Amino acid sequence: MEHSNQWLNNNDEYLAKALAWLRLRLTRLAQQQSATPAPFVAPPPPIAETNSFNWRFWERTSHPDAGARPHLLPPAPAGIAAGLITDEAITRALAEMAAAESMSPAPALVILSARLGLSRFEQQILLLCAAMELDTRISSLCAHAQVDPNRQYPTFALAMALFDEPAWDALLADGPLRRWRLIEINQPGIQPLTSSALRVDERIVNFLKGLNYLDDRLAPFLWPVAFDELDGSLPPSQHRAFETIVGQLQRRDSLQRLPVIQLAGRDAPSKQMLAAHVAAGVNLRLYRLPVELIPSHATELETLANVVEREMALWPFALYLDAHELDKSAAGEVQVASLNRFLARSNGVFFLNTAEVWHELSCPSIVVDVARTTQSEQQAAWTEVLGNQSNEITALLATQFDLNLPTIQRIGKEALSEGPAAASSLNERLWNACLLSVRPRLDNLAQRIEPRASWSDIVLPETELTLLRQIAAQVKHRGRVYEDWGFAISRTRGLSINALFTGDSGTGKTMAAEVIANELHLDLYRIDLSAVVNKYIGETEKNLRRVFDAAECGGAILFFDEADALFGKRSEVKDSHDRYANIEINYLLQRLESFRGLAILATNLRNALDTAFMRRIRFVVDFRPPPATERKVIWQRIFPAQTQTSDLDYEYLARLNLNGGTINNIAINAAFLAAQLDTSVTMPLILDAARTEFVKLKRPINDADFCWQESVEAAV
């Protein structure tokens, strides 16, 4: 309800006319009460006869205080003793109020009554209660009209005696006055309901004065979704969903109850953006309510539902219920039950954000699948936000990262705001910002490895190096092949780029994953099995789903170390444990095939993997122990340039039958020995460290292999 100053002036004029009419009614009732003796006090009528009983007659003739103790009443306002108020004066005041009521747009009281379904009598009760806040003369008139100096407030009894056509149902708890919390009743002890004080809600007083705002009692629960943060239009892939929802909401005036709009999908920001555009399309504000904040206590939930529905009528808005992260645990089931009760007690425009369709809702709903933005739409969004500074980076960003439009707009604006004086280039700022935007989703689920190894650090046969380069090339060019060349159009599975690294520990599997991540400038995440595997049924699949969903946004390579623990062979079902273990493997088979990113599986036991995984693996790289020629190259590259070495015999060191991981351990231990002696790294120190490593690995020690000095002297 946002109107001009002219409407505010007209609304004030209407309130002035309404208060003038109300004062005349109160004055006449006070005059009649003071002039009527009270020799006999009749009992109140039975409740069953109230609707047909002339309440005003009983109130005038049977009030216990009628005509008594007039000296205890507050001073009479001007007009009570000046002569009886005539019906003509009241009729004239009523006509003036009706003329002011016919203004367009209507006064606030008329708008409220229409939106909340108040009868004429209920509207008059609300006016009486609001008058206490708007006119200081009303309290004294109430006391005189009730012939009681202690009743300087409105009551239901006063309203029934004051207004025409009173109705008992105005007192009902589920009637508009009490259901919508328009008035509050102060009923201490055993005081009758009809004689208890009535007080109008502060929010309603301000509304009647033309000051409209969201009830501050909802501030702890609701967060506004600002439309100006959602620049740009919806992508074409979401237009159909937008048109479906808007078409449903445009019929809301003809529907007794609107269905809940379930927004299903994995991309929560895109669903919120869609809801914001829909709300703007039907002239509604949008507020967000996390379902975790919905109280479980019945009374608190009832109050929240009523206040929310009242505010949706007075401060028109749609409510976005965020249940995207709600699980189905015991606590989650309680929240689902509270959400069901909340929706059952409310009516309005509700969006329900869920990862999957909820079939357990107890109220009608429609399901709208919100698809992720396509690669072409993301590239168009990058081009739009970057403007004339867009270049080939837009295609690469759209290929490597699966981001929603709000995230793209935010990253693009922040990168451009740094200007040409920034220390890094625009392309570098954009890429790093994309990495940072997706990183928090995986940090709690996996261990991030900082990829520092490059192609010059890894020593492998040419065949294995070629396979690693092919893996990196396919990840880099997947957008061109899948999208531009149409492979993603004709199929939904088999598009995952994955690799299996097999070989003994220390042969370079983790380093190879680092090299690929470093080449692609992507984050590398090692899946922590202790955080994924759970003994409770269904929890392991849930954890894996969270890992894959987070990695779908791109910018990350999943590295499953010791993969045989997760991807082991399915067994014959002999009991429930076998059945649920097989379910986990089946889920992994399906998820690995549909995963659009790069997943690397590393294992020392290739034969322990289920054969079904091998069909879904695109690359298999065998890491064998290095021969002497490769060991020599490893020794030559193992010490950093800053490390001082002295007369190292690489040919001799290559004779030691060691893999790359063990060589790395020996080099580090030798460096510590040199630091302890404050000297450079020498052959004796390396051989001492090698002997220690052999003992640790319980490998047989051949003294001839460690007699480097003797072999040198013999050669001389």
Image (spheres, rainbow, N blue to C red):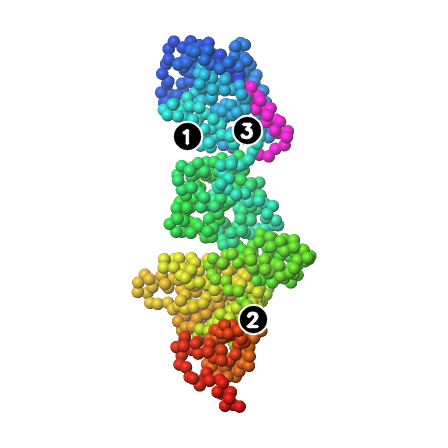
Residue furthest to the front: 677
Check if mark 3's residue and mark 2's residue have beta carbons within 8 Å. Answer: no
Q: Nearer the viewer, residue 669 or 159?
A: 669
* Quadrant of the image occupied by residue 210: top right
**Residue pointed to by mark 1:** 173
- Label 2 Cα crowd, 10 Å radius (few <14 / some 14-19 / many 20+): some
Gap in Å between the C-alphas at discs 2 and 1? 74 Å
> 398 left or right of 258?
right
Circle 3 or circle 2, nearest the eye: 2
Magenta segment: 1-21
Q: Amino acid at mark 1?
A: Ala
Q: Describe the element under mark 1 as helix, strand or loop.
A: loop
Q: Amino acid at mark 2?
A: Ser
Q: Describe the element under mark 3 as helix, strand or loop.
A: helix
Return the x and y of residue 296 as percentages of the image width and height.
40, 42
**Residue pointed to by mark 2:** 454
- Label 3 Cα crowd, 10 Å radius (few <14 / some 14-19 / many 20+): many
**Residue pointed to by mark 3:** 208
